[in-house]
Amino acid sequence: MKKLVLMRHGKSSWEYDVEDIERPLKKRGMKDTQRVANQYVKLEGLPQHIFSSPANRALSTCKLFMETADVPKKKLTVVDKLYDFGGNSVISYIKSLDKSLDHIMIFGHNHAFTSIANIFGNRFIDNLPTAGLVVLKFDVDSWKDIDKGTTELLIIPKKLRK
């Protein structure tokens, strides 16, 4: 079994005159990330390894998730190919992962993550919102063999706000 967790970066700020890759998180993005991290760990436990886009908003979301969930920093790999909005680079990267990894998590971007969730999952997702998380499970031994899987969990931060 392989478990793929996709988490879209938290709500980012457009207040600063910076390149897209440098855009920071808003406070709401930080709070939503913490809520989702707490919910995910309660339901699913910790992933074996975490991969993140190098974009500031994605990497900040990732690091905040790891801090909230008490995931050791050594479990993080930043991958340039994950700064992808279409999904092809992300899919290619996932399919290249070592088969010894069974439960991985990727922090990145839309429209890539909504597309991947719909390509590989069995439940249509109209839009994975900021700080949204989706879990896909595959009955395969190797990442290169992933095809249609099961959408096991969808966490929408808005539903966690009080």
Image (cartoon, rainbow, N blue to C red):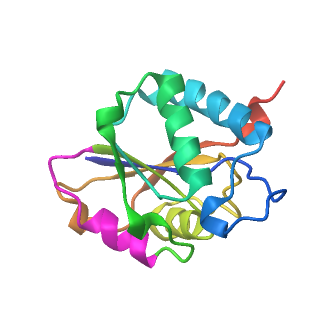
| Residue 162 included in the magenta stretch of the image | no
Give me the residue at 62% from left, 70% from top: 111
Location of residue 112 in the rendering, given as x and y in whole percent from the top left corner: 55, 69
Location of residue 1 in the rendering, given as x and y in whole percent from the top left corner: 25, 47
User: Can residue 31 be seen here?
Assistant: yes
Location of residue 53 in the rendering, given as x and y in whole percent from the top left corner: 47, 58
Q: Is residue 130 left or right of residue 117?
A: right
Q: Of residues 50 and 124, which is closer to you in this image? A: 50
Tell me the magenta residue range.
Answer: 88-102
User: Can residue 8 be seen here?
Assistant: no
- Answer with the quarter of the image where residue 97 lies: bottom left
Q: Is residue 156 left or right of residue 147?
A: right
Q: In the image as oriented, which residue stretches furthest toward the front?
A: 17
Give me the residue at 50% from left, 37% from top: 63
Location of residue 19 in the rendering, given as x and y in whole percent from the top left corner: 67, 69
Vertical relation: 34 (above or below) 17: above
Q: Of residues 61 and 103, which is closer to you in this image? A: 61
Give me the residue at 51% from left, 71% from top: 84
Q: Of residues 30 and 162, which is closer to you in this image? A: 30
Vertical relation: 95 (above or below) 23: below
- Answer with the quarter of the image where residue 90 lies: bottom left
Q: Quadrant of the C terminus?
A: top right
Give me the residue at 71% from left, 54% from top: 129
- Answer with the quarter of the image where residue 147 lies: bottom left
